[in-house]
């Protein structure tokens, strides 16, 4: 059996200018990065602003498990299948990070015969967007530390600096560090730390900005620290707004690539839904809507994290109205949610499946709360039995939701025809009545409680003393009308990663509130969320190599 990277390397790619031609773009609209990658110029984006929008389809999933769900693979295969049945479709997807690539690799560019190519480039440096974000973020840190060094004219309280440095690698040794050691010439000593680049506020800003001007104003609003009097210090106060925006001038432009069968794909922004924003950029999504009758996009992790942020933050800020949602699940993962051990998943177990389906049922209910029609996509595995698939379909149908079997990993577009037809039927017969789950005018605590109760199924929310202090502080600063971005584990509906399925009788604990005024939301920290992950015992990097002739192996 061929690996993902081998399948990708065997693909016959079209020149990217030919892929662009499929959606009405000429070579003059492109800024080429070699033969198979391009950015779309800002002039082109402005020219297309008045085009009619197509339909927007969100792909989400159950809570992820080590058994795998295949959300990205399903999204790509669905788009391929849509084009095959004559429904012109563009993919708008998130850009992978080097951190996970070399730590615990995810399905960044899909898999099997539902992949985005050039796969190696996308999973490595691509067009340099994430490197630009890293540099822009760290310029702010350098300017802040220089301000302290030059007499601290802004009266910054060194104990209340909230801005961190970032790097696009998993490196736990950088979580907590001290900078400025080695004498007066080397700066002012203080505690600091690194987050992973894609968890940074700069990433959130890049994803949510409507254009270069909006990006610039968002950068200016970033709170980096507080004065000794308790007033916020912003990037604008550091006089760094222009330089930071300049570093992002190319990164803001959406990247165009293709699937294995040449379906156009915008890859731009957004990986982590449990820390940052977790969705494809607003600019790429809006551009796709202007260029095709159908746009398929995704949000990070399960519907409790990625979809919630997509619907309550991105859609609200960008004025987007989704038309339908695809919820991806696998029989294997549902059995794991039902208590089965990973080593036993090849065995039929209807009892475990029935128990695990409760997780899927909750996500179906959540999507309905937003007024959105949904279809369940079952990402097929050879070990799935007829009895298991029948049970899954029976329970979903009882919820008023159709099920479609997806075999896109093995068959590409042909394996997604059933799902594509099911989606078209849904779009034609079910109306979207989209509305966010909470009102922005509610107090901060009530917005958090609404998400926890309605989306997670929690009984209540417990706020620590630190969280309560920060809520009051943010309210006094007039930031209480911002949406909420809850950072919690992706593995459970609760904030305890070990509670699989559909847990009940639990509370959500919020231990901190962090203002992301540039992104335009407040980050509520629940549980032990690492903004700088570490490497596992056996990093994915151990299996990667490049051969003498330049062939890449081990990337997946």
Image: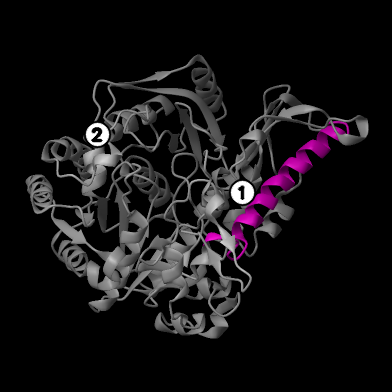
Residue 172 is situated, as x and y percent measured from the top left of the image, at 61, 35
Which quadrant holds residue 358?
top left
| Main secondary structure found in the magenta portion | helix
From the viewer's side, name the closer residue of 385 and 225.
385
| Dot label at residue 501 | 2
Q: 450 or 12, which lies in front?
A: 12
User: What residue is shown with label 1?
Assistant: 168
The answer to whether residue 87 shows anywhere in this view is: yes
> Magenta stretch: residue 28 in it?
no
Q: Is residue 369 visible?
A: no
Which structural element holds mark 1?
A: loop
Q: Where does residue 91 sit, x and y in percent of width and height? A: 38, 66
What is the span of residues highlighted in magenta in the rendered image?
123-152
Is 467 drawn above or below residue 24 in the view shown? Answer: above
Q: Is residue 461 left or right of residue 479?
A: left
Q: Residue at x 35, y 72 (%)?
A: 52
Give the crowd class for mark 2: few <14, some 14-19, many >=20 residues within 10 Å. Answer: many
Query: What residue is rendered at 76% in x and 38% in y?
Result: 144
Please state the horizontal and vertical placement of residue 232, each as a whole percent of the image.
66, 31
Q: Is residue 440 above or below residue 227?
A: below
For residue 139: magenta?
A: yes
């Amino acid at each position: 059996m061929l690996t993902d990277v081998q399948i990708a390397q065997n693909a016959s790619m079209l020149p990217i200018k030919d892929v662009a031609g499929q959606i009405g773009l000429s070579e003059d609209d492109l800024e080429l990065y070699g033969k198979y990658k391009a950015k779309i110029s800002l002039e082109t984006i402005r020219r297309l602003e008045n085009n009619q929008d197509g339909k927007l389809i969100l792909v989400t999933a159950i809570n992820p498990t080590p058994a795998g769900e295949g959300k990205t693979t399903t999204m790509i295969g669905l788009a391929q299948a849509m084009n095959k049945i004559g429904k012109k479709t563009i993919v708008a997807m998130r850009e992978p990070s080097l951190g996970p690539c070399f730590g615990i690799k995810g399905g960044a560019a899909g898999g099997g015969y539902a992949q985005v190519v050039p796969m190696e480039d996308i999973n490595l440096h691509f067009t340099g967007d994430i490197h630009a974000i890293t540099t822009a973020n760290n310029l702010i840190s350098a300017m802040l530390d220089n301000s302290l060094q030059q007499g601290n004219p802004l009266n910054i309280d060194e104990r209340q600096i909230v801005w961190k440095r970032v790097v696009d690698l998993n490196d736990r040794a950088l979580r907590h560090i001290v900078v400025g050691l080695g004498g007066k010439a080397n700066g002012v000593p203080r505690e600091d730390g690194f987050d992973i680049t894609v968890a940074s506020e700069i990433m959130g800003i890049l994803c949510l900005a409507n254009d270069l001007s909006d990006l610039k104003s968002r950068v200016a609003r970033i709170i980096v620290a507080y004065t000794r009097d308790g007033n916020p210090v912003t990037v604008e106060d550091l006089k760094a707004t222009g330089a930071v925006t300049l570093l992002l001038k190319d990164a803001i432009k959406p990247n165009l690539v293709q699937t294995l069968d040449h379906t156009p794909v915008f890859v731009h922004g957004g990986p982590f839904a449990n820390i940052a924003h977790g969705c494809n950029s607003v600019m790429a999504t809006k551009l796709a809507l202007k260029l095709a009758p159908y746009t398929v996009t995704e949000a990070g992790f399960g519907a409790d994290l990625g979809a919630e942020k997509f619907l309550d933050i991105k859609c609200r800020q960008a004025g987007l109205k989704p038309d339908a949602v695809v919820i991806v699940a696998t029989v294997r993962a549902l059995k794991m949610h039902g208590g089965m051990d990973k080593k036993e998943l090849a065995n039929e177990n209807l009892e475990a499946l029935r128990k695990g389906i409760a997780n899927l049922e909750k996500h179906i209910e959540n999507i309905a709360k937003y007024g959105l029609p949904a279809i369940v996509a079952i990402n097929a595995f050879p070990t799935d039995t007829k009895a298991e698939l029948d049970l899954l379909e029976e329970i979903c149908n009882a919820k008023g939701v159709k099920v479609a079997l997806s075999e896109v990993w093995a068959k590409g577009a042909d394996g997604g025809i059933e799902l594509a037809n099911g989606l078209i039927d849904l779009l034609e017969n079910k109306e979207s009545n989209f509305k966010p789950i909470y009102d922005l005018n509610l107090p901060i605590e009530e917005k958090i409680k609404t998400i926890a109760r309605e989306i997670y199924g929690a009984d209540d929310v417990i706020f620590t003393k630190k969280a309560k202090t920060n809520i009051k502080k943010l309210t006094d600063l007039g930031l209480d009308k911002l949406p909420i971005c809850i950072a919690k584990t992706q593995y459970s509906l609760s904030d305890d990663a070990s509670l699989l399925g559909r847990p009940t009788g639990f509370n959500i604990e919020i231990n901190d509130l962090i203002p992301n005024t540039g992104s335009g939301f407040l980050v509520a920290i629940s549980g032990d969320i690492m903004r700088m992950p570490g490497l596992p015992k056996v990093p994915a990097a151990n299996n990667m190599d490049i051969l003498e002739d330049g062939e890449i192996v081990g990337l997946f």
